[in-house]
Amino acid sequence: MKEIKKIAVLTSGGDSPGMNAAIRAVVRTGINEGYEMVGSIRGYHGLISGEIVPLHSRSVSNIIQRGGTILKSARCKAFYEKEERKKAYEKMQTIGIDALVVIGGDGTFTGAKLFGKEYGIPIVGLPGTIDNDLYGTDFTIGYDTAINTVMEAVDKLRDTAYSHDRLFIIEVMGRDAGFIALRSGIATGAEIILVPESPTYIDEMLYKLEKDWKKNKTSGIIIVSEGDDSGGAMEVEREINEHFPDFETRVSILGHIQRGGSPSAMDRVLASTLGNAAIMTIKDGVSGVMLGMVDNEVELTSFEKSIKHHQHIDLELLDMARVLAI
Ligand code: F6P
């Protein structure tokens, strides 16, 4: 195998709080191990266009607490095309990049898997997404911050829900997975949590609301994942209004606020640990894997597996939430 001298790091897909902490850990560990470190701007786009910046210890000062990503991020559709990956490879050869650390989700690892196989480039991945839907890690970088952001927003909404005797239907992110809805719902004592992993029966939901009302609940919170089969918060509100015209409802779609903000301590520590381990993994000659934290240990999962499998939501937690919301 070719000697590795220069390593590039990039962030790709939807950004998540803690990506900067991961970049910092990758860069500083790399420098400590004697590698030259560079960053690719806007994920894979930077590799294709040659927008590569040098990264020194000081380039990553004062970023551990910052949300977003200093390297910028993008969902690079072009990278799915063989021709574009060839361009990226050629640019890497010209610049002298020998290995890659990619931070992102499923799409990022799909690109990495193809690229690594085609050109034999050592690539390791770090799980960066607020959705927590990646197989091979208990938690992804950004998830903890996102659920805390949701929790703070819902606490505020509950204040006004209580004052006005209103039912709030709050939509949270998670196109394909309900992890954000599940844990933020438990943390805020939501009356109802709707997630894509469990079918939503509107009749059941209406029955629960009616029961709550009879038990003198005069306000409430429904958390619905954007990917839920109910169709989302607006649709849930429409059903409720149709059946209970006396209920006063409001919808709040939290949106991209969930993707920003200063990372929590948990996310900073996770990002730092995995960022550090990413460089050591490359140094050990291992490639084509995503690093994750499983039962407090760093674990490696092949890109293939991490893409193919999905992290399963704990449905027992959903049952528990139902009991606690009576
Ligand atoms: O994958 C992370 C995520 O935030 C999803 O929860 C959400 O559905 C999606 O990205 C939104 O993507 P975009 O920023 O492209 O609108």
Image (cartoon, helix red, strand yellow):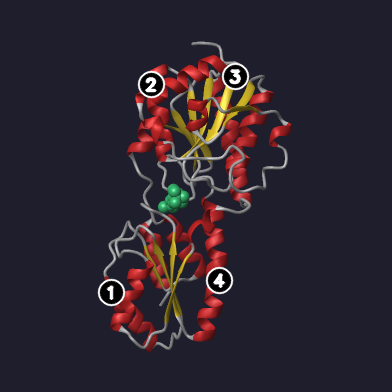
> What secondary structure is marked by label 1?
helix
> What secondary structure is marked by label 3?
strand
Earlier-in-chain disc, 3 versus 1: 3
Q: Which residue is mark 4?
A: 155
Type of amino acid at the residue the image marks with label 3:
Lys
What percent of the width, then of the height, locates residue 254?
49, 63
Q: Which residue is mark 2?
A: 117
Type of amino acid at the residue the image marks with label 1:
Glu
Earlier-in-chain disc, 1 versus 4: 4
What percent of the width, then of the height, locates residue 60?
69, 36
What percent of the width, then of the height, locates residue 119?
41, 17
The Cα–Cα distance between marks 2 and 4, rounded to whole angstroms, is 47 Å
Earlier-in-chain disc, 1 versus 2: 2
Residue occupying the far front of the picture? 49
Q: Nearer the viewer, residue 100 or 309?
A: 100
Type of amino acid at the residue the image marks with label 2:
Lys
Q: Which residue is mark 3?
A: 6
> In the displayed structure, does residue 308 sit left or right of residue 143?
left
Q: Nearer the viewer, residue 263 or 234?
A: 234
What percent of the width, then of the height, locates residue 30?
63, 25
Q: Which residue is mark 1?
A: 204
Q: Quadrant of residue 27?
A: top right
Labels 1 & 2 near each other (Cβ < 8 A) = no
Q: Residues within 10 Å of mark 1 (few under 14, many from 20)?
A: few
Labels 2 & 4 near each other (Cβ < 8 A) = no
Earlier-in-chain disc, 2 versus 4: 2
Q: Nearer the viewer, residue 281 or 241?
A: 241
Q: Nearer the viewer, mark 3 or mark 1?
A: 3
- Is any atom of residue 214 visible in this view? yes
Residue drawn at (67%, 30%) of the image:
28
The Cα–Cα distance between marks 3 and 2, rounded to whole angstroms, is 19 Å
Residue drawn at (43%, 29%) of the image:
112
